[in-house]
Image: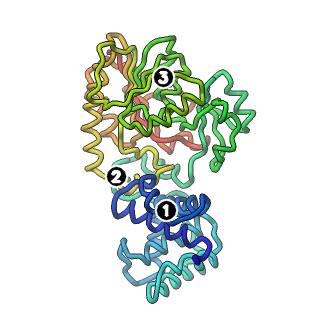
């Protein structure tokens, strides 16, 4: 019989191996890696441990290397176990004796003695992690002068953001739920809030959506019965926003499974949309739209607060491949807008190749964002685009990284 907590550590090791060695996402790796982990609490612990290791990987390795003369390769199991042990102690506040009891059984013989010695040395030193995680060098190079500011927003999990079906009830729901609001139709709750326990879910009063993720649909304004195409729509938060804002929505995505979640949320909220399962690049229509919102597939590096695996598995090859796809999607999206209509492009990426460089090559008429369209604390770029990152609105809990641009066709 396993020691309590040991299955979660075994699962966390498998998650980290899937991300760091095979380049999988934490979400996609969870099904296989956590098969042997029973119970929701242990699965949540495994994901929390793996997430903290990925968030603080460079700093954990620096501590390990400071406490041993032995060279431990990055893929050596003693290093992986020590990363978990330190993350449990320094980030999840697990007492050292419990860390030792659940960490050392993952190793045998000499490696176990080495890990015990390194961990004990660091505990005696009362070591601490820095105020903000140290980003991988390749990531710092890509993010440039904003890298340190972004890193400061990655130390903790983000708060829980809700998008309201009826923005006129913002003050009511903020007070009822004990939250704060940074924009009409937005309520922010403290990190760690259990979604299933929040009032208003069953009656469809809100859905979970990061503030930054809500901006592309907000920037199309009120629909007033006009027709909009939500291209690459799943999992559907923007479709719900557009329907609530009075648009006639066609929501298109190639993933039938992910669109099922959208249909469930439409039913829960009482909102309506035409849901289409199709390849966005191949789909055409003879009747063009008043507006098209393209939230394109991307590297998702802007979601690094909640998905720290992107810090380690995204590189130039993936970014270049995605940028090529985004260019094709943008051109096709523009062809689906009626003359005089609007096109909004968005990616939850911090990479210039997926954002600014995509917008710069477009020859459509720019429809620049105005400061009064944006939540307080955010401002358009000189080009009239919008760039957010996890270092912004830090005093209010931050937000994900997005790039958004708008044109008239």
Dot 3 falls on a residue whose secondary structure is: loop
C-alpha separation, residue under disc 2 versus residue under disc 3: 34 Å
Name the residue beneath numbered marker 2.
314
Q: Which residue is painted at 33% across and 55% down in the image?
A: 138
C-alpha separation, residue under disc 1 versus residue under disc 3: 36 Å
Question: Does residue 160 sit above or below 115 in this rendering?
Answer: above
Going by the image, does 160 lie left or right of 21? right
Closer to the camera, 363 or 241?
241
Q: Which residue is painted at 47% across and 51% down in the image?
A: 307
Q: Which residue is painted at 38% across and 76% down in the image?
A: 76
**Does label 2 or label 3 sit earlier along the sequence?**
3
Q: How many labels does the image show?
A: 3
User: Is residue 204 in sight in this rendering?
Assistant: yes
Going by the image, does 394 lie left or right of 368? right
Residue 254: x and y, percent?
35, 35
Can you tell which quarter of the image residue 333 is in? top left
- Circle number at residue 34: 1
Whether the residues at callouts 2 and 3 have beta carbons within 8 Å, the answer is: no
Which quadrant: the C terminus?
Answer: top left
- Circle number at residue 273: 3
């Amino acid at each position: 019989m396993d020691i309590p907590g040991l299955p979660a550590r075994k699962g966390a090791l498998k998650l980290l191996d899937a991300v760091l060695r095979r380049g999988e996402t934490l979400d996609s790796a969870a099904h296989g890696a956590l098969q042997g982990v029973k119970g929701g609490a242990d699965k949540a612990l495994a994901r929390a441990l793996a997430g903290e290791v990925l968030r603080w990987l460079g700093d954990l390795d620096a501590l390990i290397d400071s406490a041993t003369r032995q060279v431990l390769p990055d893929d050596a199991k003693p290093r992986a176990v020590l990363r978990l042990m330190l993350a449990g102690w320094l980030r999840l506040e697990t007492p050292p004796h419990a860390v030792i009891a659940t960490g050392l059984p993952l190793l045998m013989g000499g490696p176990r003695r080495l890990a015990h010695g390194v961990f004990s040395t660091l505990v005696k030193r009362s070591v601490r992690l820095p105020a903000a995680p140290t980003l991988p060098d390749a990531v710092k190079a890509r993010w440039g002068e904003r890298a340190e500011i972004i890193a400061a927003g990655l130390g903790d999990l983000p708060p829980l953001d809700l998008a309201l079906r009826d923005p006129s009830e913002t003050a009511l729901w903020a007070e009822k739920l004990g939250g704060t609001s940074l924009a009409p139709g937005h309520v922010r709750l403290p990190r760690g809030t259990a979604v299933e326990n929040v009032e208003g879910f069953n009656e469809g009063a809100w859905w979970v959506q990061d503030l930054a993720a809500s901006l592309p649909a907000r920037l199309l304004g009120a629909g007033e019965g006009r027709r909009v195409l939500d291209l690459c729509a799943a999992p559907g938060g923007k479709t719900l926003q557009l329907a609530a804002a009075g648009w006639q929505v066609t929501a298109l995505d190639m993933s039938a499974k992910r669109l099922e979640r959208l249909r469930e949320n439409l039913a829960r909220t009482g909102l309506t949309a035409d849901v289409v399962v199709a390849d966005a690049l191949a789909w055409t229509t003879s009747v063009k739209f008043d507006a098209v919102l393209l939230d394109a597939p991307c590297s998702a590096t802007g979601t690094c607060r909640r998905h720290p695996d992107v810090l380690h598995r995204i590189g130039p090859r993936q970014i270049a491949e995605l940028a090529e796809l985004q260019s094709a999607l943008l051109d096709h999206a523009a062809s689906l807008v009626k003359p005089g209509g609007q096109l909004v492009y968005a990616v939850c990426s911090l990479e210039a190749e997926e954002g600014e460089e995509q917008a710069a090559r477009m020859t459509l008429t720019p429809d620049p964002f105005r400061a009064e369209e944006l939540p307080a604390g955010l401002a358009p770029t000189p080009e009239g685009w919008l760039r957010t990152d996890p270092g912004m609105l830090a005093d209010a809990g931050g937000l994900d990284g997005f790039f958004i641009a708008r044109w008239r066709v």
